[in-house]
Image (cartoon, helix red, strand yellow):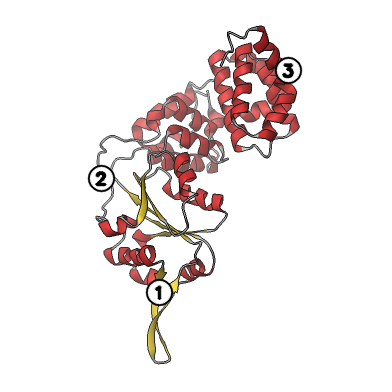
Amino acid sequence: MDIKTFIKSASVLPAHISILAKGPTGIGKSHIFHSLGKKLNIPVIDRRLSQMTEGDIIGLPELVDGVTRFAPVNWYIQACKEPVVLFFDELNRATLEVQQCAFQIVLDRELNGHKLHPETRVYAAINEGSEYQVLDMDPALLRRFWAVDLEPTVDDWLAWAYSRKDVSRVIQEFIKVNPAFLRHDKEKEPGKVYPNPASWHRLSETLIHANINPDDYAGSKSMPDLLFPLCMGFIGDTATVKFVGFLQDYTRSYSAEDVADNYPNLKVEIHESLNEDKKNDLIEKIMLYLTNNADDITLSQVENISNYAKDCPDEMIVNFFNLIMETKNLGMIKKFHRHLGMLVKDLVQSNPDKYES
């Protein structure tokens, strides 16, 4: 299941239905559940069960009035007092004892007499693949979940990356052009480093932190000394050679922000350097930008984007306007209709056969 469908489906499930996401390491399962918590507007308590002992879940014994009982841990008490997303990561790498504690929480929604808040949601993730030592999951535990095999698409990752400031635009373009390098799905050689969505993110964070932002070196034949070894450690040798070559041969492209915020200054440069396919690619970026920032688009940005569309071929103008209409975002449609509505109407009426749909 792709990420967009998963989040949409998971957000409508009743709170008492637990969710289990299965998939290879590095596809962003943890981030997906944090995004889900944000969508539900409740905090996320993230616990990596592979690093926990039984006492980390059930608490430690204490003597009260001559009776021994377990003092509950603080995060579990929070999940009992208020709605939260209780996220158990790496469930199948946990010890059998820890899995049994998790089983009680999933099955009974309580632990040692402390019941979860009715709106608290229990989510879990397991890693699949030969690179991890894992325990077989108890079939009885699996049956208690809405279990999903997550298969994020390249578009899922690009949409996520585009919304962040710590993922280099050049890395995003590399993945778009070379989608097979987002994740290595073939048989892996033990001990060898391979790329995955999480490692591309960590690489970008590291390069930006080290003042080696790939965006600043795009198209340069001279690369920083540390670029190659840093890339090797995160994405492996094959992906590093391909990425560094892409970086050196890079030709300037333009982002949606370039158009939205600075189109008057870039107008000539954009239209002289981009062919029709690249202009279409830029429209795709603009639509992604509009989708992610629908409530924050200013009138000035709408005007700049509309002017870019007007300077494109007629068919591209009509296509862009149709994409805006397909968003069904009434506020956005009204804004762009003011700038493009009459033009598109005239184009369609002048050549109805061409634009029939």
Q: Nearer the viewer, residue 173 or 105?
A: 105
Viewer can see residue 11: yes
Mark 2 residue type? Ser
| Residue contact between numbered discs 2 and 1, judged by CB atoms under 8 Å | no
Q: Nearer the viewer, residue 237 or 6?
A: 6
Q: Nearer the viewer, mark 2 or mark 3?
A: 3
Q: Earlier in the sequence, mark 3 or mark 1?
A: 1
Residue at 44% over, 33% down: 154
Q: Which residue is mark 3?
A: 342
Residue at 65% over, 12% down: 348
Mark 3 residue type? Met
Q: Which residue is mark 1?
A: 59
Q: Nearer the viewer, mark 2 or mark 1?
A: 1
Q: Which residue is mark 2?
A: 130
Q: Nearer the viewer, residue 217 or 86?
A: 86
Assess disc 3: are there few (<14), some (14-19) or many (≥20) residues with their C-alpha within 10 Å of its C-alpha. Answer: few
Q: Earlier in the sequence, mark 2 or mark 1?
A: 1
Q: Nearer the viewer, mark 3 or mark 1?
A: 3
Above or below: residue 259 compared with residue 135: above
Q: Earlier in the sequence, mark 2 or mark 3?
A: 2
Residue at 38% over, 31% down: 181
Q: Nearer the viewer, residue 238 or 336?
A: 336
Q: Secondary structure at mark 1?
A: loop
